[in-house]
Amino acid sequence: MALSFLNPSRSYDAENRRVRFIGHDGMRSVPFAIEIGALRAKGLSLLNGEAESLAAFDASLGAIHDVAREVYKSNRQTTYLLRAADFD
């Protein structure tokens, strides 16, 4: 089954400086996180907290989901961390 993103919720992880979100492969939940540095790599330099990070995530949602699908397809794991290098 293909990875989908049915649940639009996401959360900011201040301690680890990441945005967390969930994908689904059938009935299986697939946890993802994207480093704030990966959002910065998309040309957004002023990400100083939750509001800015979530707004940057939302603005790049399509690209983030595309990269998440590629990473998931290439290597099945229990959790995934997207980094700036994944977007090159």
Image (cartoon, rainbow, N blue to C red):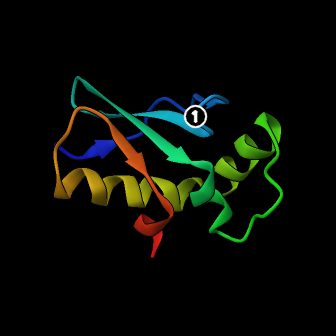
Quadrant where the image shows the C terminus? bottom left
Q: Amino acid at mark 1?
A: Asn
Q: Position of residue 50 (x, y in %)?
A: 77, 35
Q: Nearer the viewer, residue 60 or 14?
A: 14
Label 1, secondary structure: give it. loop
Count of residue discs: 1
Instruction: Locate residue 34 relative to residue 37 in the image: left or right.
Output: left
* Res 81 → quadrant: top left
Q: Nearer the viewer, residue 2 or 85?
A: 85
In the rendered image, residue 14, in percent from the top left (x then y), is placed at 67, 30
Question: Image quadrant of residue 54?
Answer: top right
Q: Position of residue 63 (x, y in %)?
A: 51, 62
Q: Which residue is mark 1?
A: 16
* Residue at the spot 38% in from the left edge and 52% down from the top edge: 68
Quadrant assignment for the N terminus = top left
Report the residue that reaches farthest toward the bottom.
88
Residue that appears at 31% across and 34% down: 79
The structure residue drawn at horizontal position 40% and vertical position 60%, both measured from the top left corner, is 67
The structure residue drawn at horizontal position 21% and vertical position 30%, both measured from the top left corner, is: 26
Q: Of 30 and 49, which appears nearest the observer?
A: 49
Is residue 68 left or right of 36 when viewed as pictured? Answer: left
Q: Is residue 69 left or right of residue 13?
A: left
Q: Position of residue 38 (x, y in %)?
A: 57, 59
Dot 1: few (<14), some (14–19), or many (≥20) neighbours within 10 Å? few
Q: Quadrant of residue 27?
A: top left
From the viewer's perspective, is residue 14 above or below residue 57? above
